[in-house]
Amino acid sequence: MQGLTEKRITVTGGAGFLGSHVVARLKAAGAKEIFVPRSRDYDLTDMAAVRRLYADARPQVVIHLAAVVGGIGANRLNPGKFFYDNLMMGAQLMEEGRKAGLEKFLAAGTICAYPKFAPVPFKEDDLWNGYPEETNAPYGLAKKMLLVQAQAYRAQYGFNAIFVLPVNLYGPGDNFNPDSSHVIPALIKKFDAAVRAGAPEVVVWGTGKATREFLYVDDCAHGICLAAARYEKPEPVNLGAGFEISIKDLAGVIARLTGFKGKIAWDVTKPDGQPRRMLDTSRAAAEFGFKASTHFEEGLKKTIDWYRTHGAA
């Protein structure tokens, strides 16, 4: 991460799930001037607040991780908010960064930006070959517009903006709120509660046939820091672990690791979301040497342990 440690760095979302791990990585590498704006102080959907952020922090590098996110249920309930808030935060931060003479802007996108039926594994070149999966399309498209903006600003203004596409994340500190959590924390919460209550059955959304790829949050933080330090090109870059697991198999693994021995029932009236998800991660390896290092079950055990220590109450 040479080249970052002497910079004034602003990490939006730096107190959040991914952001806190990115900030920890930056500090461990020797970065001393890291500013983490809090939403109570800076509403990043408001242009005046964004301008005030740049005036207060005077960043040389911005790592934009702040987002309004959630699982399938939250996306279905809040499509307008998820579109507007994510679009406005990124668009205004990039525009004001350009005006302020920012040296580098990293925008974190989402795997939800990919077409619903993209060939597996998803290659960055397939990003525009179809419409995203409907339940999270507004969120995915809002994030994808930041790639358009980054490339347009690079072409017109020489603005050094890069765009990374992390796959689904998991790990200690994840969001376990059942109204907005993603699949791994939702399942951990369900199975842990069933174990505590001695329940004979856990009901899981969908058919279990959909597949997903998961990246341990600290691995993702490492990838983002490497990209911020080393990557200088307009093309988007996937950040993933390079494996695929069905939701049915995932539920089985989490049941085993939490000690649940009852029945898993599938509520097929609920949506599966995108049929398959797995990223081609070769560009990140070639461009800035990123490769995930945390074994999936090891990461799940750490996440379950964290939840049982900090979150179950």
Image (cartoon, rainbow, N blue to C red):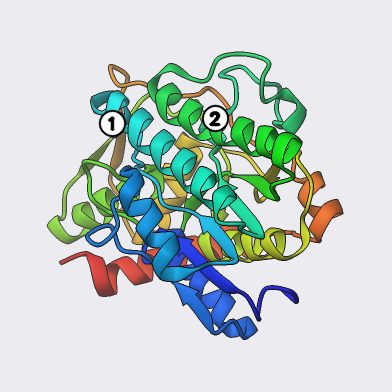
Q: Which residue is situated farthest in the right direction here?
A: 286
Residue 169 in view here: yes
Looking at the image, residue 16 lies above or below residue 29: above
Whether residues under marks 2 and 1 lie with C-beta atoms below 8 angstroms apart, the answer is no
Measured as percent of width and height from the top left, residue 92 is found at 45, 42
Residue at image coords 27%, 75%: 309
The image quarter containing residue 39 is: bottom left
User: Would you call the spot at circle 1 few (<14 residues within 10 Å), some (14-19), or many (20 or more)?
Assistant: some
Measured as percent of width and height from the top left, residue 171 is found at 45, 61
Looking at the image, residue 232 lies above or below residue 148: below
Camera-nearest residue between 31 and 158? 158
Circle 2: residue type: Met
C-alpha span from label 2 to label 1: 16 Å
Camera-nearest residue between 53 and 100? 100
**Mark seen at residue 81:** 1
Residue at image coords 15%, 67%: 313
Measured as percent of width and height from the top left, residue 285 is found at 81, 54
Residue at image coords 64%, 46%: 164
Measured as percent of width and height from the top left, residue 101 is found at 62, 57
Q: Which residue is mark 2?
A: 145
Circle 1: residue type: Lys
